[in-house]
């Protein structure tokens, strides 16, 4: 059985403050399956030869953020002290 995955990738450059969105399908998307937050991926998977990218986060189809400390692909009920994502300054 062949699984054809499809991902929407946001590539951000913190120095310039600009972001680029790419849609990755078919064979290149299958190369992203099984990767974890914090891993380095080759730019060839995103049609950007010569670059390397670090996976720094993501979200599922409903917008729930991923956590580096929770293994697996499904949602899990966890007890946390502090959330991830945007933290407003008081």
Image (cartoon, helix red, strand yellow):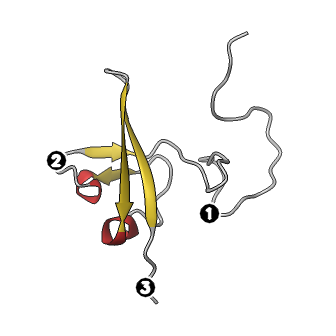
Which disc, if any, is residue 2? 3
Judging depth in this view, the residue of 36 and 33 nearest the camera is 33
- For the residues labelled 2 and 1, say whether their Cβ atoms are less than 8 Å apart: no
Residue drawn at x 68%, y 63% as measured from the top left: 74
> Dot 2 lies on which element?
loop
Residue 50: mark = 2
> What secondary structure is marked by label 3?
loop
Residue ranking furthest to the top: 90
Q: Which residue is drawn at 76% across and 58% down?
A: 76
Q: Position of residue 44 (x, y in %)?
A: 23, 57
Gap between marks 3 and 1 measured at Cα: 19 Å
> How many labels sit on residues?
3
Q: How far apart are marks 2 and 1 (CA)?
A: 29 Å
Q: How far apart are marks 3 and 2 (CA)?
A: 29 Å
N-term mark: 3 or 2 = 3
Secondary structure beneath label 1: loop
Task: Report the residue at 50% width, 49% height from top.
Answer: 37
Task: Tell me, yes or no, whether the two marked residues, 3 and 1, touch with CB atoms within 8 Å.
Answer: no
Mark 3 Cα-neighbour bin, 10 Å: few <14, some 14–19, many ≥20? few
Q: Mark 1 points at which residue?
A: 73
> In screen coordinates, is 81 left or right of 7?
right
Q: Which residue is drawn at 81% across and 54% down?
A: 77
């Amino acid at each position: 059985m062949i699984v054809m995955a499809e991902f929407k990738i946001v590539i951000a450059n913190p120095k310039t403050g600009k972001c680029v969105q790419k849609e990755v399908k078919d064979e290149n998307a299958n190369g992203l399956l099984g990767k974890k937050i914090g891993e380095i991926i080759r730019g060839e998977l995103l049609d950007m030869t010569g670059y390397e990218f670090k996976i720094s986060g993501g979200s599922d189809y409903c917008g729930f953020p991923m956590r580096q400390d929770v293994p697996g692909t499904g949602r899990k009920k966890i007890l946390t002290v502090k959330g991830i994502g945007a933290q407003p300054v008081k």
